């Protein structure tokens, strides 16, 4: 039997782009007859007709599996749902908007055939994105590399191929705050970068504004390092030391020269400064505690409204039963 390759496509309000996406992907994978194919569309609670379009595509293409989530859970969870339903020996994750050129799939597969567990796309250019987005993204990955002990390669997205064992490993990480780029590199395994030029969206618009990206960055940091908490500790030690010295100095000064009371400016400045720092770090503590709170609830990651497997998957399940 041929090996199966699954392509996981999270889609949120992508009605404009899905038909184009499908025909592009089809033209790439059709010639690769060595493998069987499955395309898993995950409808992440879209409010437009994304699901209808997936159903239509499915009715004329046997390779399509459709996972319809009960509401919008966000890309990270939608991807996880897709990985969980995909049956392939190798699994490719790709955005629906064609910013990730499907042509790379050919390179991905040859890397996988050569024994790499992961091959990821590394963008050399990003078309159609503002300099501010590029700059902040670059700074974020630099910072992550410095403050956490996982290495997230710069300029990579989620577009990649993964071996079965990599996906099985990823699925064992059940955390709710899923920073997938971190999770991908956390599991390890031999990986390879493949360079490409990131294009502008084929249609529709980005779902990530700066506020979402900021939260995404906080998610990344809090999921993979407790350095901000340590900074609080060391800053606390430093401030206490300074305060201790200042205390001794004040006592000695008063003994030697007396104290004509005054010092309102010093008092207020110190108070405000310390108050500010305390609030800041209570906030940081809160970020972590909030996440502990969410994780301890131990809820399922998502709910599926409907799942319709591709024909090949139905066949595989029958074989499993026997
Ligand atoms: N996406 C999703 N759920 C969301 C937001 C986005 O499944 O809540 C999908 C979206 O349909 C697309 C991919 O994630 O396939 C990347 O989204 P987008 O192109 O908006 O992000 P950008 O490329 O701007 O970072
Ligand atoms: Mg995009």
Image (cartoon, rainbow, N blue to C red):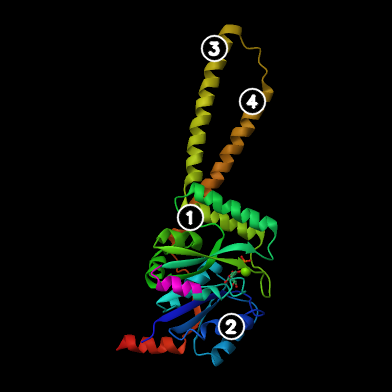
36 to 186, vertically: above or below: below
Quickly name the residue at label 1.
223
Question: Which quadrant: the C terminus?
Answer: bottom left
- Does 315 sit left or right of 107 as displayed? left
Dot 1 beta carbon under 8 Å from ligand 1:
no
Q: Residue at x 61, y 56 (%)?
A: 137
Disc 4 C-beta below 8 A from ligand 1: no
Identify whether 4 is placed above or below 77.
below
Q: What number of labels is visible? A: 4
Q: Which mark is residue 162?
A: none
Name the front one of labels 1 and 3: 1
Q: Disc 1 to disc 2, how far (Cα)?
A: 34 Å
Name the spot of residue 292 as percent of width and height, x first: 46, 55
Q: Which residue is mark 3?
A: 252
**Picture residue at 38% right of the left edge, 69% below the top:** 115
The secondary structure that dominates the magenta segment is helix
Measure the C-alpha gap from mark 2 to mark 3: 79 Å
Report helix, strand or loop for mark 1.
helix
Of residue 258 and residue 182, the one placed in the foreground of this image is 182
- Mark 3 or mark 4, earlier in chain: 3
Q: Name the residue carrying label 4.
A: 267
- Dot 1 or dot 2: first in sequence order is 2
Asked which quadrant contains residue 21, the reply is bottom right
**Image spot of residue 133 (x, y percent):** 66, 58
Q: CA distance from mark 3 to mark 4?
A: 18 Å
Instruction: Using the numbered discs, state the Cα–Cα distance from disc 1 to disc 4 in whole angstroms.
Output: 38 Å
């Amino acid at each position: 039997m041929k090996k199966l390759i699954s392509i996981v496509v999270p889609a949120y309000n992508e009605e404009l782009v899905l038909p184009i996406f499908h025909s592009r992907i089809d033209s790439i994978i059709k010639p690769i007859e060595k493998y069987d194919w499955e395309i898993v569309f995950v409808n992440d609670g879209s409010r437009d007709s994304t699901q209808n379009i997936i159903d239509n595509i499915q009715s004329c293409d046997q390779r399509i599996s459709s996972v319809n989530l009960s509401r919008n859970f966000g890309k990270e969870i939608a991807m996880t749902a897709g990985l969980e339903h995909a049956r392939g020996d190798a699994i490719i994750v790709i955005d629906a908007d064609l910013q990730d050129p499907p042509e790379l799939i050919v390179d991905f597969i040859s890397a996988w055939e050569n024994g790499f567990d992961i091959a990821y796309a590394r963008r050399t250019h990003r078309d159609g994105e503002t300099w501010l987005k590029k700059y902040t993204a670059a700074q974020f990955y630099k910072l992550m590399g410095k403050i956490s002990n996982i290495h997230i390669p710069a300029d990579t997205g989620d577009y990649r191929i993964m071996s079965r064992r990599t996906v099985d490993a990823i699925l064992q990480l059940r955390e709710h705050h899923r920073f997938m780029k971190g999770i991908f590199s956390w599991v390890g395994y031999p990986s390879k970068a493949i360079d490409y030029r990131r294009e502008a969206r084929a249609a529709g618009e980005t779902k990530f504004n700066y506020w979402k990206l900021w939260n995404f960055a906080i998610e990344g940091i809090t999921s993979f390092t407790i350095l901000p908490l340590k900074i609080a500790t060391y800053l606390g030690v430093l401030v206490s030391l300074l305060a201790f010295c200042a205390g001794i100095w004040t006592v000695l000064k008063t003994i030697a020269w007396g104290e004509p009371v005054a010092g309102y400016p010093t008092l207020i400045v110190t108070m405000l400064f310390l108050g500010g720092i305390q609030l800041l770090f209570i906030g940081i503590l809160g970020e972590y505690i909030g996440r502990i709170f969410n994780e301890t609830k131990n809820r399922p990651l998502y709910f599926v409204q409907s799942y319709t497997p591709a024909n090949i998957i139905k066949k595989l399940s029958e074989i499993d039963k026997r």
